[in-house]
Amino acid sequence: MAASDDTNTVLITGVGLHGGPAAASGLEPAFEALARGESAVAPARLEGVEGLPPFAGAPAPRPPDVRPLLPDRKIAKYMSPTTKMAVVAAGAALADAELEGTDREAAALYVATGLIAFDLGAVRRAIQAARSDAGELDLRLLGERGLRLCHPLMPFKMLLNMPLGLISIIFGLRGPNAIYYPGADQGAVCMEAAWRGIRSGRLERALVGGTTNGLSLLPVATLRRAGRLAAVPAVAKPFSPTHAGYAPADAAAFLVLESACSARARGARPIAEITDVRSGRRGPFEPCSMVGSAQLVLLSGTLDRAADAAALAALPEQGRVTSLDAQLGHQGAATLFWSAALGAAMIERQRALPAQGCAAPDPRLVTEPSALELDRPLCCATVSPDGSAGMVTLQGVSS
Amino acid sequence: MRRVAITGVGVVSPIGCGVEAFFDGLRQARAGVGPIQSFDASAFPTRIAGEVRDLPAAAASWPEPDLAAALARDPKSRYGLAAGREALRGAFGDDRPVRHHPAERMGVMLAAGLEVFHLQDIVAHAGGDGVDGAGLLASLEAAPSMSRLQIPADLAARCLRQEAGAAGPLAVNVSACAAATQSLGEAMWAIREGALDLVISGGYDSMVNPLGVGGFSMLEALSTANDLGGGASRPFHRHRDGFVLGEGAAVFVLEERELARRRGATIVAELLGYGSTMDAYRVTDPAPDHAGAAAAMIAALQDAGLPQGHVDYVNAHGTGTVKNDQAEIAAIRCALGASAERIPVSSTKSQIGHLIGAAGAVELAAVIFALQQGIVPATINLTDPDPACDLDCVALTPRPAEVRTALSNSFGFGGQNAAIVVGAPQC
């Protein structure tokens, strides 16, 4: 149980989500939707792109409406879908934490963002204008007339630091900051930077989160090129006998982290304590072997049956494991934040959510909703086929 | 308190590849900006940049065909890999870092620019009504490697992690113009606070490509003084008209100082303090009150335990845009107080252009030059200073000076401010 008077204690005091099976941005409806077995993963399509083979994806429930959050509606012109999802989730986390005024202004901001969802539509007219008679790109034509046909704000939608800059501008955060890219392990990098800063006393609080627009052409093409794209929702289920590939997701999640002293001074309601954050690459399933006394591993990122088996092989004998990837899809840079939010909710409710479609005959797999203890740690771990991994360990807090 | 030593440096820049060549370029006040040669920019509004000219192919070779093909198509990743290798050689010679540090105590924290998009790969698949996804996928799948269309910006960082045998965190910072200084600052904190013992840090970038030059031209951020060639990058000049893009990389081996000493490493310099803030103002403009930039410098000095104004040199962000240069000079004055009047300030971008994600890293290498050589790099092309930029902006030629501590600034498009304090090795 967290020691509430410990200055080194790092608490989660706010959560904001975008994506997943629930339309709401709050943790409660997201958790309940998942508990009911609802899934965001479905046959997917990409707007403006024809001829793609069938694939599974987890689209956000609807395009994020950022307008109510903006001090100046013109700012929306600078925002890519990746940035819009980040802004919606960040705003929800700040509201959930009731973080305002100078407390908000001094907060640090660490963001993980996925691959650029290159807006082919924005450059299509320019490319057409720059096409030579032979059908190739002519840079003279691009310079003479193509550039003028691009949307003038196109560069802003491609700059990778825009989620960071616009969250700062819209919500008035002025503290230490960074934005990392592009995989799930970068979520652990963000969280570790904030967690360590708070534990060392250098920071009082931070907004941390990730955003990914996985359902766009280039990320989908990249997954397919690598043989990692699930053809149908039924195979995008970790620990199922047919698990084969990812269902890319549109998703964002943000958390407010703060010291126990800061939370107490503000009267903030803690959801969980973060007791450890790590990332690295010793072996693809290292997080499973590092969980120690964790009562449950909430695992994300396993690609296929072989990866599931390797994860189980690395898990301690007494450990239990679940995965929500079948319902959330592959959330990339947002993964660990979604996991941490849901892990916190599981501990708070003392209830583990099962892995949907899970049929592997291993007693450590959570196949039905089951009880959790408030005072034993839960580990959220994400792994990727290249061996990169990140983990965050959570513990309950006393009321 | 744990301290952070720099024990290896690698540089790839428009004025020379390798630390010695770069230092020589600074000493000679050489201009690295010239007509763009890497693609046909003759019809673009801006036709000049600071390009890397003399990087040997072997410096960034890679045995795996897929990655080698991607590296061949992505200059910034080649620069990052080459600079990282030079830094590791400088720190460890032919030895392996894992002989001195546990693999999980070694991390890679690098800044990178945008992913590279190859417009020529898209042309055939962009129709009047949309994108021919099937055709694009077929094209991608027929290609021999990940080198088609989109090359992830973390490529060089992953190569360096593998080469160094590091198993700790890999962090790829994409905070644009502030990214490299942020990476170095976060790496310093990670070592100082005991999370890691060694970090390969710095930055690599090249936006000298049709989309990069075209995109910044659309934002009217680039100088169009094409006829001036090497004279076009003019920070603090009365007639400056925007920045000039550059490309390159600088990578550093950072180690906990006592561990570095124990293994007999040569300590090049020390990272003493870091400050990071956001303007929370506008995407396109620096805040008019300069508060965010000044706060970053003040925070860096406080983090270093130095009193206000206690530095011997400021390497400015100094882009050459009208608003940024004025705002930075005002912020320096605000942060350093009365001392600002006597502290030499210069912008290395006058020589190499704006390296965006690599800017803060290559500029840290310039600061190390000042510390080691006792020479403050020049702001070349500063023939007619802007009266509003009225600090001691070391003009035209380098200046001999004793430099024990220095401040290096980086400010990002979007309002990120980062400042780092560097010191000569302490006994």
Image (cartoon, coloured by chain):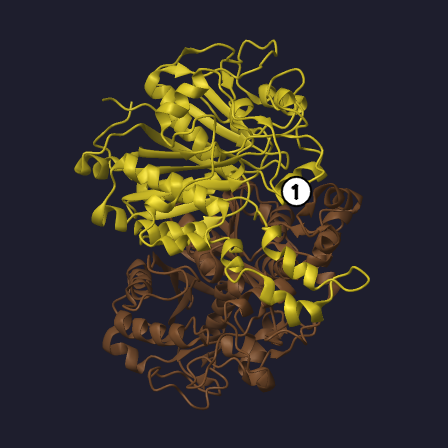
x and y, in percent, of residue B95 in the image = 64, 53
Q: Is residue A390 above or below residue B55?
A: above
Which percent across, then down, holds residue B291? 28, 65
Inspect this view and state whether residue B42 appears: yes
**Count of marks placed on residues:** 1
Where is B189 relative to B46, above or below? above
Residue picked out by circle 1: A49
Q: Nearer the viewer, residue B103 or A154?
A: A154
Res B252 seen here:
no
Give the letter of the brown chain: B
Q: Nearer the viewer, residue A316 or B268?
A: A316
Question: How dense is the environment of label 1, judged by Cα within 10 Å: few (below 14), some, or many (20 and up)?
Answer: some
The residue at the far front in this view is: B129
- Considering depth in this image, is B340 or A111 the residue closer to the camera? A111
| Image quadrant in which you'd find residue B57 | bottom right
Quadrant containing the C terminus of chain A in the rendered view: top left
Give the quadrant of residue A246.
top right
Q: Where is residue B7? Give x, y as percent.
A: 52, 60
Mark 1 secondary-structure assignment: strand
Q: Is residue A4 left or right of A180 when viewed as pictured?
A: left
The quarter of the image holding the N terminus of chain A is top left
Does B92 sit left or right of A136 as displayed?
left
Query: Which chain is represented by yellow in the image?
Result: A
Residue lying at 68% horizontally and 47% vertically, measured from the top left: B131
Hey, which residue is sitting farthest bottom in the picture?
B383
B261 displayed left or right of A70: right
Say left or right for A395 vs B70: left
Which chain's residue wears label 1?
A
**Residue B14, image x, y percentages:** 61, 73
Tell me the amino acid under the disc marked 1. Val
